[in-house]
Image: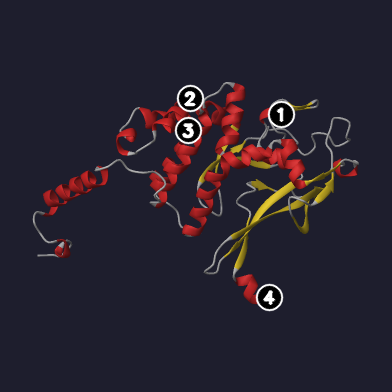
Amino acid sequence: MSKKKKETTEIDETDILISKGKNDKVVPVKLTKDSRFKFRCHPKVRCFTACCSNVNIALPPYDLLRLRRRLGLTADEFIKQYGDIQVLDKTLLPVVTLRMRDDEKKSCPFVTPEGCTVYEDRPNICRYYPVGMATLRKLDAQGGKDEFYFMTKEDHCKGFEEDHQWTIGEWRADQGADLYDEMNRGWMEILIKKKSHGQGKEFPEIKNEMFFKMSFDLDYFRAFVFNSTFLEIYDIPADRLERIQGDDMELLKLSFEWIRQAMFAEETLKFKEGVLEKRKERSDTTMRKVYGNKPKTQIGDID
């Protein structure tokens, strides 16, 4: 029985997007939003900021957007100054990771002895700490998923010695993680879709570049929407169009929908009437120019 269960489920930690340190200890207990734990971090804790070094943090699109807006930088400027591009092992897709300082501790570039200089806009993984989140996905015909939480305890962390008690749900709300989860959910689903599309199978380089630019460079995607034939092709309701013109968060959600349609042919965006027919007509015209009036069943045959 246990063997069968193992074959039909897998733990997907794509949602975590963080490399654990050598001294991290994942407590092997499956937790829920109602699970309680004691923890508090503040400047008087002996280990204050010790967790802000020697860690590999990937920045989902909303995390990067918040940080670069805080610093007044474009996406390209932020990546050049503070980021690296790393390919995720499970999806083989490029993502942005936060570049640590080149010091002995490999410290976060935004941490000081007094604390985090971008605290209000810190990445979501920093908000979750010391909680981790993972997804148990069923591999059988029924599919489905079960999100759960776990606790990570580092040897140096004294926050667990504090008396303040939370549920995981209360902790997430207090740290502002709910908004980050909501904003990055569409992007996480793209990673999960790519993983299920075929682990170990790479997309063509041009497709990876498209995914990267449309995910992380919102100015690039904005130009794509408003300075190309995008609005001639896709039927975007007037009220939504007004929102995406003035709201980066709405524009980011649209980018995730377009990426899913472009990468996996999902019908996430509606085409304007007649667009598909015109595309087919252009395709047929091109085929006739290349192959003449040869029947499609004979295309590829050698005369």
Work out how far the residue at label 3 is from the one at label 2, CA to CA, in angstroms. 8 Å
**Amino acid type of disc 2?**
Gly
Residue at numbered disc 1: 119
CB atoms at circles 4 and 1 under 8 Å apart?
no
Mark closest to the chain's N terminus, 4 or 1: 4
**Amino acid type of disc 3?**
Leu
Mark closest to the chain's N terminus, 4 or 2: 4
**Amino acid type of disc 4?**
Ser
Residue at numbered disc 2: 246
Indicate the position of residue 206 as horizontal and vertical percent values: 38, 44
Residue at numbered disc 3: 251
Q: Quadrant of residue 52 in the image?
A: top right
Indicate the position of residue 4 as horizontal and vertical percent values: 62, 76
Horizontal relation, residue 207 to residue 147: left or right: left
Tag 4: Cα neighbours inside 10 Å, few (<14), some, or many (≥20)? few
Q: Indicate which label's residue lies in the foreground, 1 or 3.
A: 3
| Callout 3 secondary element | helix
Residue with the most extreme bottom position: 1
* Residue 155 in view here: no
In the displayed structure, would residue 301 be above or below residue 166?
below
Is 84 in front, or is 104?
A: 84
Q: Indicate which label's residue lies in the foreground, 1 or 2.
A: 2
Work out how far the residue at label 1 is from the one at label 3, CA to CA, in angstroms. 24 Å
